[in-house]
Image (spheres, rainbow, N blue to C red):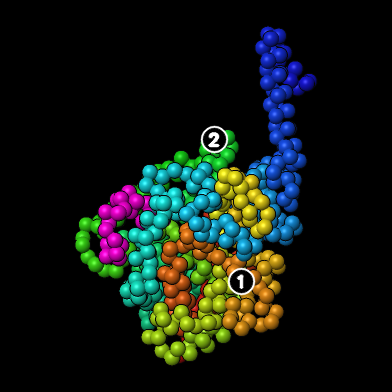
Amino acid sequence: MAVISTYTDGLEPNLASILATVLLFSILHRAWRIVYRLFFHPLRKYPGPRLYAASSLPKLYKVSTGNVHRMQQRLHDLYGPVVRIGPDQLSYIEAKAWKDIQGHRVGGHGSFQKDPALMGKQEHPDIIHADDATHSRQRRIFSHAFSDRALKEQEPMIGGYVDLLIAKLKEHSGLDDMNSEGPPKPVDMVRMYNFTTFDVMADLTFGEPLGMLQGGEYVPWVSNIFGSVKFMVMGSFLRVYPMIGRIAAAFLPKSLAEKRKKHAEFAIERVDRRLQYDKDRGDIWSLVQRGADLNNISRGEMYSNAQIFMIAGTETTATLLSGLTYLLCKNPDKMSKLVDEIMGLGSIDQLNVTNLQGLPYLNACLEDALRLYPPAPMVAPRIAPQGGATVCGQYVPGGTTLGIAQYAAYRSPHNFADPLDFVPERWLSSPPERYASDKKDVLQPFSFGPRNCLGKNLAYHEMRLIISRILWTFEIELVGKNFDWLNQHIYGIWEKHPLNVKLKLRDQ
């Protein structure tokens, strides 16, 4: 009370008493809230550190510093498959949690909805941010553009960009006919993979590439995406904590809103330009128009989905390719087995959708790279339905925020033997005995259930084709082998280091 009297000296007695009382009750209220969360809250029996049970601030701090994935891994290693990571938040690493939280539910009753505060509001919600009914409608419309039939039709276009990637890798390495003298020059594969995937998706979404592969530089629109994503993720989390958000907003760059506006305007302009000509070229809008009446989707929804395709269908694929390249370089025995399998197809013309899909070791390498370096590692939180639900055999009160911590789940000894090692063999139909009991169904890098990733098949084909063509053409070696490239921060997406490699033309 000495502190209180210091601030109330000189005030009218009644006013001073009121202020002191308000301050005292505020302190008592906050103290009681902490006591309630620790000893009386419905989640009190779930394991986890008391600091995280008492306040959301510790987790928010980890999010703001890009270390939330490491925090979740550490806590699950300490406390087990389910951990209380906030006053009203639970984190899971068991495979059953995918089905219990994000699986199909009859009529949608008792479904776990996405956190509306985290998602934010959109005038024209895209397929990720839409409610269940809008999502189902949009998914039916866009499914034509991401079907197996569509992928076959898009294969020549995608192959053309991979041809250009190979040519540019030769050029940047000094291995082309014009620059064949001297030692190979290092190439940053993160940039080259980004250039490729953004150009492919721009062609599918806008009807024209961004020209990054050809020009060898990021266009401003893509640079703004990478420059703003950290603040966008923080903004999403701060919406959940409005008081903290109002304070933090003062420290966000003033240019952020302008960048987001320009980002939307760029997509709108490109979509409008594509829709002006009625050309059936196998891109998203051609295939949508063939399969469904475009009147079933508004122009605003076209704009918002174009923006989401250009993020969800680009950076994530490039991320996995970067991680896989690093893991193969660090494990030359695995690289050699994969090269032998690819070369076994006989000729470069055989590197197509059907043949690559049937290569077991290639698919195994992709799966273990997705496990160790998932492109979308953040928890996608859901809200338990009113009345509560059962998750992994335990009751969860309604209103609880919960989700699967992918990074922690995929690196947990609870799910995998040698969880930190790159072992593609664990994914083969007859794995070594040591890995036969791995809980492989926990790996869901493209999410799970009725709202899983629509572009999964496209992503797999791009990844198979690009890595196969590169390994067919080049021998790859890391520049500077004594560093852990996977040791990165997360801000919604990975904050990737450059991945510099030396390329050498492979003897055919």
Bounds of the magenta segment: 287-308
Is residue 74 in sight in this rendering? no
State whether residue 38 is above or below residue 31.
Answer: below
Q: Residue shown at 42%/69% (left/top)?
A: 458
Secondary structure mostly seen in magenta is: helix
In the rendered structure, which amino acid carries the disc numbered 2?
Arg
| x and y, in percent, of residue 274 in the image | 26, 59
Q: Residue furthest right?
A: 2
At numbered mark 2, what does the secondary structure look like: helix, strand or loop?
Answer: helix
Q: Position of residue 483 (x, y in %)?
A: 64, 68
Asked whether, in this view, residue 84 is left or right of residue 338, the answer is: right
In the rendered image, residue 238, in percent from the top left (x then y), is placed at: 55, 42
Q: Amino acid at mark 1?
A: Lys
Of the two numbered discs 1 and 2 on the same chain, state the one appearing first in sequence. 2
Where's the N terminus, which quadrant?
Answer: top right
Residue at figure coordinates x 56%, y 47% from the top left: 385
Picture layout, residue 351 above or below residue 410: below
Residue drawn at point x = 48 percent, y = 90 percent:
344
Q: Is residue 300 left or right of residue 241?
A: left
Residue 239 marker:
none
Q: Is residue 303 magenta?
A: yes
Tag 2 residue: 246
Q: How many discs appear?
A: 2
Q: Which mark is residue 440?
A: 1
Q: CA distance from mark 1 to mark 2?
A: 42 Å
**In which quadrant is the C terminus drawn?**
bottom left
Q: Residues within 10 Å of mark 1 (few under 14, many from 20)?
A: some
Magenta region includes residue 29: no
